[in-house]
Amino acid sequence: MLPAVAALLCGCAALPEPWRDFQAGWRTGHVIETGAAAGITRPVDSDCRTPAQARDPGRRFAVVLYGTHGGLLKLRVAPLAAASTLARDDWVQVNIERCDALRPPDSRSP
C-alpha cells in the first residue's frame, strides 16, 4: 500500500515527458503553408494572428495540420519565430492552448 500512496503523491512528476508536453497543449503537426498573415486565406479551426500582426508584412505564420485526441484533423495558424526556416511539409510541434511559436517535433522544452 505504501508504494501506491507514494506514486499518488508524485503526481505529474512521474509522468513521461511527452505526456507532460501533451498535457501542456503541444501536438505534432504538419506544416501545409507558410506566409505573411494577410496571405493566409484558407479557413482554419484556430488562429493566432492578431490585427497588429496582420498589418506587419515581415511577420510570418504557418498553417499546421494536427490530429486531436479523438482522431479529428484540425488546422491552426501559428506564429513562426523570426529566424525560422520552417517550410511546407516540415513536421513541427504546435501548441493548441497558447500562441507559442512552433518548435521542432523532437523538442522537449516549451
Image (cartoon, helix red, strand yellow):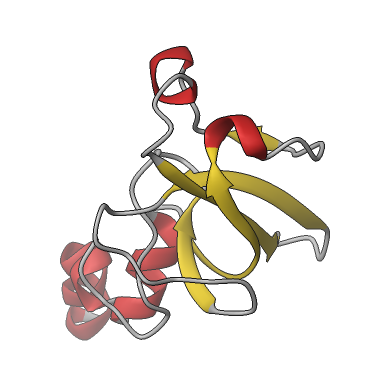
Rendered position, 102 above or below 99 = below
Residue 72 location, quadrant: bottom right
Q: How many marks?
A: 0
Identity of the residue furthest to the front in this view: 57
Rendered position, 108 above or below 70 = below
User: In which quadrant will I find the N terminus?
Assistant: bottom left
Toward the viewer: 65 or 22?
65
Q: Residue at x 63, y 46 (%)?
A: 76
Residue 23 spot, x, y in % from top left: 42, 57
Residue 44 spot, x, y in % from top left: 75, 39
Residue 68 spot, x, y in % from top left: 70, 59
Identity of the residue furthest to the top in this view: 51
Is 74 displayed left or right of 23 in the figure? right
Is 85 displayed left or right of 47 in the figure? left
Toward the viewer: 86 or 76?
86
User: In which quadrant will I find the C terminus?
Assistant: bottom left
Residue 102 location, quadrant: bottom left
Residue 70 location, quadrant: bottom right
Is 60 displayed left or right of 73 in the figure? left
Toward the viewer: 77 or 55?
55
Residue 93 spot, x, y in % from top left: 46, 68
Q: Residue at x 46, y 40 (%)?
A: 97
Toward the viewer: 42 or 96?
42
Q: Residue at x 29, y 79 (%)?
A: 107
Rendered position, 1 above or below 76 = below
Q: Residue at x 29, y 54 (%)?
A: 81
